[in-house]
Image (cartoon, helix red, strand yellow):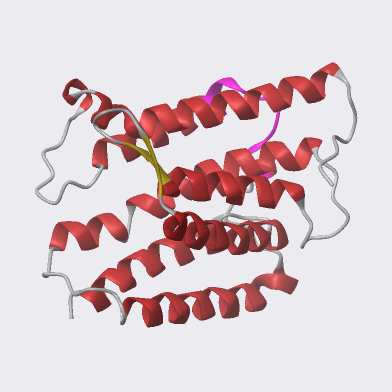
Amino acid sequence: MLTLKNKKLETLKVLSAFVIFFLVNQISVNLPSISSEFRIFNSSSNWNWDGKIYTIICSILFLLFYKKYQLKDYFLTFKQENKFFKKGVIIIISLLIFKITLMFFAPNKLLNWETLFYQFSMPGLDEEIAYRGIMLGLLTKILKYKNLILNSSVWITAILFGFAHGLSLSKEFSIIFNIYPFLITMFYGLIWGWITIKSGSVLLALISHNLGNGMGNIIRMR
């Protein structure tokens, strides 16, 4: 059940900060597709380097100007909960095996070094800082939950993560919804969210995210 910890004005302010950050983050990542004036790099593989850089800048600016919480409250720390660390490593290895297995059934791709460099770096960096870092951190401060499985903060960020990958706009500005990328990214978002909560850090989720994307592309380039 989605319930605020309290209905104080400060709680509503945090919720507003969450909504504003999410919207600005989504606008930032789509700026290069909105106008060519926002493009910095000419990607031969059409990867959104510019949008990812804008969202990272967006996250940094948020952390600089919204100083209500410390970095550790957003899980932006290298420090891990020792009791969970080994389990976390096992989980990310399992996720990696699952992702690689799926890629064996995907269409082959030509070897492309830019694609590999992009997938091993950018997606996990900007998305984990934003979704499992800032957004998850904000929601855990204001939403109640009974247990980790029913943690509404994890579910909300995972669903939004799914929509960010499943929803798109056509050149005619009509909304396109693809169910498969929505479901698969929401699934990963749930696992990465739970790992982040248990470990107290986005580090394992970030490593898992980038390794999964990078290794998945290597398999497809076989």
Of 204 and 21, nearer the camera is 21
Q: How many marks?
A: 0
| Residue occupying image coordinates x 28% and y 35% | 170
The magenta stretch is 62-72
Left or right of 111? Residue 188 is right
Q: Was residue 71 drawn as part of the magenta stretch in this picture?
A: yes
| Residue occupying image coordinates x 31% and y 82% | 104
Left or right of 76? Residue 208 is left
Q: Quadrant of residue 34?
A: top left
Is 68 located above or below residue 42 in the figure?
Answer: above
Is 29 located above or below residue 80 in the figure?
Answer: above
Q: Was residue 172 drawn as part of the magenta stretch in this picture?
A: no
Percent coordinates x, y for residue 96 in the rendering:
45, 76
Examine the rendering and report whether any part of residue 76 can be seen.
no
Q: Quadrant of residue 200?
A: bottom right
Percent coordinates x, y for residue 41 in the rendering:
15, 36
Left or right of 25? Residue 69 is right
